[in-house]
Image: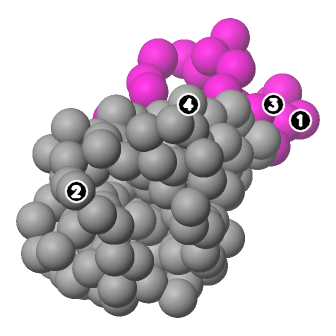
Amino acid sequence: MYKIYLDGHGAEMTQGILPIETVLEINESLKENDIKLNEYIIDHEFANEYFDWYEIDDHFHCMGAYVDNSSIRVEDESGNEIYVEKCSNLQIANNDWDDEIYPEDSKVGEIGVLTCLEIQKGTFLTGNLNSDSFDPLLLSIDIKGLGDTEFITSISYNGKEIDDLDFYDTITKNFIANLEY
């Protein structure tokens, strides 16, 4: 048995639609309280109505390590590190990509598009590989992306997804929000 770790930097990213009325209320509160959008979203004392940014995700929602800023490491049953590699060098098994949405693309009238990115660092996935031997050439990753941001969503070995993956032992490093209307 081998233990697999996916370490590095990544994020939770959402993108969703807000009614224009909500967008206007947010903008007014930003001006009145002289705060930035990310402060408004994180610090609910400024918000007239409470909402969770991670629930505004009708277009996109994903958590994972960045492909270009993470690595995979494997330990044997004795805890000895036997393999370390940058994830950008691994084979990609599945690629699920979404295009960003923009307010001007709306067919339902005036809207706002809220995109949030909670940047994280740590161990994003851990799992056990039940195999008698380990061949790094049999490792692959699944990715999901939005715009130019891509996340690792799972790890596979010999064509099968490692099914007992535990998710996320990370800490938040930054929060970025963008509201277009």
> Which residue is label 3 attached to?
32
Residue sitting at 22 percent across and 56 percent down?
A: 132
Residue sitting at 43 percent across and 39 percent down?
A: 77
Q: Residue 121: where, in percent of width, then height?
A: 69, 45
Occupied quadrant, residue 29:
top right
Answer whether labels 2 and 3 touch (C-beta < 8 Å): no
From the image, give the main secondary structure of the stretch colored magenta. helix
Q: Nearer the viewer, residue 132 or 165?
A: 132
Quadrant of the drawing holding the N terminus: top left
> Going by the image, does 90 lie left or right of 32?
left
Task: Mark yes or no: residue 117 visible.
Answer: no
Q: Vertically, is 63 above or below 152?
A: above
> Which residue is label 4 attached to?
169
Query: Given the image, on which type of amino acid does mark 4 rest?
Result: Asp
Query: Given the image, on which type of amino acid does mark 3 rest?
Result: Glu
Q: What element does badge 2 sit on?
A: loop
Between the C-alphas of marks 1 and 2, the distance is 60 Å
